[in-house]
Amino acid sequence: MQILLGENVKIIDDIIYLAEEIISIFFKHNKKYIENCLNLSAGDNVLIKYYYDSVDVKNSLDIKKYPTLLYFFKENDLEVFFSHGNLLYRETTKGYAKKVKNGFLVHIKLPNDDLILKYNELKNNKHLTETTLKIAISESIKNILIHELRHCYDMWKQGEHFAIYRNPNHKKIQHEVFYGNDYKYFSYMNIPHEYWARFTEALSRISHPTTIKDNKTYINFFIREMIGFSDLPKEDQKRLIKAAINYYYLKNDN
């Protein structure tokens, strides 16, 4: 998948910042959910699921703040659903994105295992406050949301050249994985649209590039954060490293 060098930084950063703003809107819409979670008794070990919410992104925030996504939003609506798994393909799926008539639909599963573990840790250590709970929720879904937003952008940008549309075998692998065939999971992880989404996730987890002294150190951080990097073919690893170095230098030049 071609990533235009001039757009590389801004696209990645806009997707990251967009994910953060969508999560902030979720908090505004779900004050009762936050309150219910804070009031669980000490013996409860799962989060209350009394919410079902969606964010109509295009009409909920100022799109002009995301210049690299202006044409995307000119041509597409984007709705992000937060649910507790009943609308997802399989129980272990944390999120997914798909093309719909007027644009794109993203589903994010909440609570997920990461959030439940963090919640119980905060509760047991008596550190559970509205602030710590919101941080835990944000940390448990931010990377998932970034991943799915990258899929939406790539599906729009690549059109009929998007990997799943271009290669029938890729489409078959995705279908089998979504419906429970774990034996195909590593094959799915190596599909280009999937590793570019994980690439964007990885960059979001690294400290601001200007705080890292050199590109070699940055790439070491990147390889550590990039899920499934070691399982990719060598040529794909080289493409990702090259893109990460471009990101590092472009960020440091600004």
Image (spheres, grey):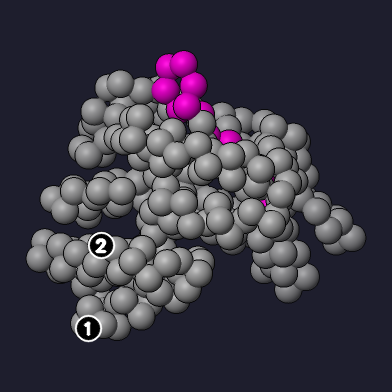
| Magenta stretch, overall SS | strand
Give the image location of residue 72, x and y in percent: 29, 29
The amino acid beneath tag 2 is Ala
**Residues in magenta, as a range:** 99-112
- Of mark 1 and mark 2, the one earlier in the sequence is 1
Q: Which residue is mark 2?
A: 243
Residue at position x 66%, y 60% from top? Answer: 114
**Residue 44 located left or right of residue 65:** right
Kindly indicate whether the residue at mark 2 contacts the one at mark 1 (C-beta within 8 angstroms). no
Q: Position of residue 29 (x, y in %)?
A: 56, 33
In terms of image quadrants, where is residue 175?
Answer: top right
Residue at 13% across / 50% down in the picture? Answer: 6
Residue 19 in the magenta stretch? The answer is no
34 lies left or right of 143: right
Indicate whether 31 appears above or below 229: above
Residue 36 percent coordinates (x, y): 74, 44
The amino acid at mark 1 is Lys
Query: Residue 213 shows which numbered tag?
Result: 1
Whether residue 109 appears in magenta in the rendering, the answer is yes
Residue farthest to the right, as pictured: 43
Is 227 on the left or on the right of 153, as rendered?
right
* Residue sitting nearer the eye, 143 or 29: 143
Callout 2: 10 Å neighbours few (<14), some, many (20+)? some
